[in-house]
Image (cartoon, coloured by chain):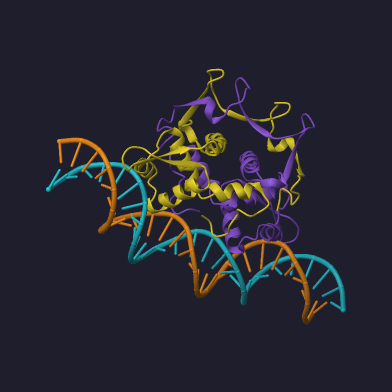
Chain colours: A yellow, B purple, C cyan, D orange
DNA sequence: TCTATAAGTTCCTTCAGGGAACCTGCAAGA
DNA sequence: TCTTGCAGGTTCCCTGAAGGAACTTATAGA
């Protein structure tokens, strides 16, 4: 958790960062998404300090991103909630950017196969109304109902 | 910057976090995207420490996300590079999640108007091959060419 | 009963974040 | 020309979060 608290800012980016803005949290979500669901599995896979992992998991559970469930006699597993599963969309866009700008010569470390068409593909952003591509260059940003605006 | 370095991990998420994983960086990008391009503007808008803002801006310029340009007599402005503009896609997905799960009763603080159709809409993830929706529940994750895999 | 393992907790050290004060170079006004 | 103002930092100190290793507790199986 950062020192400055983002949770009360009138900005959806800041409030999202309040939940998963600390650098380890997206990697923890990734691990849970791909099936590393127990404490020691995640700790060893990421090489994160046990102390920090404890703090992050508690925070993510408290924010309803992960659910902590008894697994078998005194053990626990962490699973994504619906709220957490939607955060994986963010990871998919991170993967897209990382593949494009940082992957180097070895190619991407991971591929997606889309259930609907069966093809190996990557993710694109599209408009929920007309379904055409929708990138940062394709939009105007306007103040919304909670009118503090995009930038405050 | 976090203490553990993510830049060398064989994971596109970790390498993306290495560039913008520190909590202030997405908010700095947001400010530059909406037109807050000078040091004092960003500092006052975000309430970030001048020291930390200096460090973040240098890091983002060094990583070719922002460009630092002379503006008029000894002043400078920061502008997004192509690499940086693509990171704004990440912000758009953060906004989507934040609007849905943390906006409360006031409604979203910002709206997008899509140039292609002129409508107020939000962003969706779709498949680059078949253009149908592509969410975390719609895909299989497979090891890619740099076969350390999604989870390492 | 003894041992192994999972899931933390505790303690200590180091380093990053926050905040305030200070510095520097350019520009315009008196 | 002097000086005032401002943008864009830099420097200093203090606090608190991250890292790491050792310790603790509870359960399961041999």
Residue farthest top in this picture: A117
Q: Nearer the viewer, residue B95 or B46?
A: B95
**Residue at (62%, 22%) from the top-left corner?**
B132
Q: Is residue B59 left or right of residue B73?
A: left
Q: Nearer the viewer, residue B76 or A77?
A: A77
**Residue at (62%, 60%) from the top-left corner?**
B48
Figure check: A8 above or below B124:
below
Q: Is residue B71 left or right of residue A52?
A: right
Q: Is residue B43 left or right of residue C7?
A: right
Q: Is residue B40 visible?
A: yes
Q: Nearer the viewer, residue A69 or C23?
A: A69
Give the x, y percent position of residue A45.
37, 41
Q: Is residue B61 visible?
A: no
**Residue at (68%, 57%) from the top-left corner?**
B42
Q: Is residue A29 left or right of residue D25?
A: right
Give the x, y percent position of residue A128.
70, 30
> How many labels, in total?
0
Q: Which quarter of the figure has residue B100?
A: top right
Q: Which quarter of the figure has residue B41?
A: bottom right
Give the x, y percent position of residue B46.
66, 57
**Residue at (76%, 49%) from the top-left corner?**
A147
Give the x, y percent position of residue D28.
25, 38
Figure check: A146 above or below A139:
below
């Amino acid at each position: 958790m950062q020192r400055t608290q983002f949770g009360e800012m009138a900005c959806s980016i800041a409030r999202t960062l309040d939940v998963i803005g600390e650098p380890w949290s997206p990697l923890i979500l990734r691990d849970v998404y791909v099936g590393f669901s127990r404490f020691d599995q995640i700790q060893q896979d990421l090489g994160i300090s046990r102390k920090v992992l404890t703090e992050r998991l508690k925070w993510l559970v408290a924010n309803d991103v992960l659910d902590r469930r008894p697994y078998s006699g005194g053990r626990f597993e962490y699973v994504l909630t619906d709220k957490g599963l939607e955060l994986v969309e963010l990871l998919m866009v991170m993967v897209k950017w990382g593949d494009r700008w940082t992957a180097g010569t070895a190619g991407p470390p991971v591929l997606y196969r889309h259930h609907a068409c069966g093809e190996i593909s990557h993710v694109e952003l599209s408009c929920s109304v007309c379904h055409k591509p929708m990138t940062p260059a394709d939009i105007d940003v306007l103040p919304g109902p909670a009118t503090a605006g995009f930038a405050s």
